[in-house]
Amino acid sequence: MPLLQVDNGGFTLDGEPFRLLSGGLHYFRVHPEQWADRLRKARLMGLNTIETYVPWNLHQPRPGAFTAEGGLDIGAFLDLAAAEGLYVLLRPGPYICAEWEGGGLPSWLLADPDIRLRTRDPRFLAAVDDYFARLLSPLRRHLATRGGPVVAVQVENEYGAYGDDTAYLEHLADSLRRCGVDVPLFTCDQPADLARGRLPGVLATANFGSRSVQNLAALRAEQPTGPLMCTEFWIGWFDRWGGHHVVREPGQAAQELDELLAAGASVNFYMFHGGSNFGFTNGANDKHTYRPTVTSYDYDAPLDEAGDPTEKFTAFRDVIAKYAPVPSEPVPPRGPKLGLGTVALTESAGMLACAEALGTAVDSLRPLTMEQLGQDFGFVLYETALPAARPALLEVEQVRDRAQVFVDGLPAGVLERENHEHAVAISVPRPGSVLSVLVENQGRVNYGPGIHDRKGLLGEVLLDGVPLTAWTSRPLPLTDLAALPFATDAATLVGPAFHRGFFDVKSPADTFLHLDGWTKGSVWINGFALGRYWSRGPQRSLYVPAPVLRAGANEIVVLELHAGHRARTVVFRETADLGPTEE
């Protein structure tokens, strides 16, 4: 591969002037069997480069473990990009934001009660250095200096919005170099944060979605020479539960792109293709109020969640064609979709009754956090015996993030972090009644000081002002549902329950699962975790990638946390419903 150089005049590639026309495509948000299709479509839009973050928390789920297999086989992704003739901008973090759980920082860091993330805390830096060594050593062959597609690597991510410790950034850059990264390094920040987040001697780039001339001028004021680049050109946005589906008018976005390219800048679309927050991987924001992100990461991008070109694909390709050659091939057509109709879920298993099959309880004086339990995602079930029969007030110091309260298995209330709720009145029918509190991690905060976001029940739990002690804390990561004792005679189940059904597919293709009439929960198809649903919206369907399905019989499992559809049916349709947009 040619080598990218940064000089006072701009980018050059093997000595020739070069403009990066890049698009964000996160391999970890796309089924690996669909990587090649998405990369081909990037080239067809006129892009010459692909950008991807790397999620530390998935690659290193425990301190001593590292994985790069299956959907995390970043080497295979980079090989496919090279085969398509695309260069790669690699953004390994350690922090990535990305509306991703914890901003990509692994939850096990938070098991240390006073660790300071994104600082020179020796514990954090030691963990980062170990991560870089595990990730980057096998990836050296993918660097452009060794014939691979990776032409540049990012240092941290929008650090100026978090801190201003240049020595911290210097440590990260040195760590990357020690791991063999010998291609150009760069930082990215929003224009107002450039002075705080840049690293002298390293290319600074800016993130914005409008007012290109003004924001490029701010970048030039901070960095008088060198390439102008927008590393995150925001052409859409993400959605949160309880909000509306955010869209951006294609013509207006294309006009902003034209302005950006006319100024001679390089660009990376954020996003070219967003994909999905499969499973429990969505992040959250907390600016005084906690707001979890939805499952879909469609982002109103040029390729939608299912990889189909949108109006923006054509609008952006037309603008790019004014400044660079664009392939003559036509815009790819929409891929085939399945409308399987209604599927009945005929078997069920109560979650609380089956808890022992899903996780092992740990005894403690107080409730243990997820991090203390060595748990990343999912739920924790806390239980203790109540001392006397009486009406009582249950108070929880901190709920992270949503707690369903049960007394002897019967629902007694819900406490939501999002609504700043800490107390619920309960009725204790007898001495020794079992208090069960099922807590859902709805996504660790991915931006700002709130990234120190421990999950579960934090602090004291009081009953009429008296601390409750002698708890069991049972982690329920829900990574394996094989032990669930499904039965067909569970019509009277109360509380959270798993519901299972089967359906046949002749020829697998993408489809969209609609859960009309259901309240809140998660879905698995053939063991693949699709993500969360919530009647709160805006998202009203879940994307089902074709490779998740198989010809013949298929299994679907729905975890419903409240009152499910009375008929216990779901519907597979050919179209998505991401909810109403703001007028």
Image: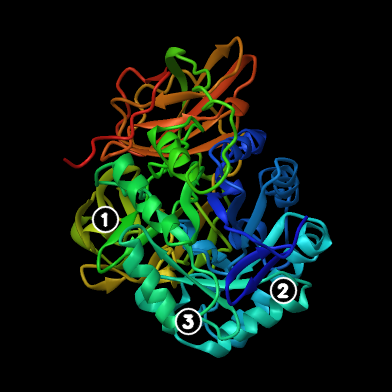
Mark 1, other Cα within 10 Å: few <14 / some 14–19 / many ≥20: many
For mark 3, give the secondary structure: loop
Tell me the CA gap for discs 2 and 1. Answer: 39 Å
Which of 311 and 356 lies nearest the eye of the viewer?
Answer: 311
- In the structure shown, which secondary structural element does the residue marked by tag 2 occupy? helix
Label 1 to label 3: alpha-carbon separation: 52 Å
Kind of residue indicated by mark 2 = Asp
Decide: is 111 above or below 349. below
Along the line of sight, which residue is nearer the eye, 39 or 325? 325
Residue 581 visible at all: yes
Q: Name above or below for residue 349 compared with residue 420.
A: above
Tell me where residue 365 appears, x and y as whole percent.
45, 71
> Which kind of residue does numbered mark 3 sit on?
Pro
Callout 2 crowding tier (Cα within 10 Å): few <14, some 14–19, many ≥20: few
- Does residue 437 appear anywhere in the picture? no
* Residue 549 falls left or right of residue 148: left
Q: For this view, does 154 lie left or right of residue 441?
A: right
Q: Which mark is residue 415?
A: 1
Q: Secondary structure at mark 1?
A: strand
The quadrant in which the N terminus is found is bottom right
Asked whether, in this view, residue 222 is left or right of residue 462, the answer is right
Q: Give percent across and percent down for residue 396.
A: 29, 66
Residue 571: which quarter of the image?
top left
Q: Tell me which corner region of the image, top left, top right, bottom left or bottom right, holds residue 325.
A: top right
Location of mark 2 (residue) = 130
Q: How many marks?
A: 3
The amino acid type found where label 1 is placed reads Leu
Q: Check disc 3 and report the residue beneath it.
A: 224
Figure quadrant of the C terminus: top left
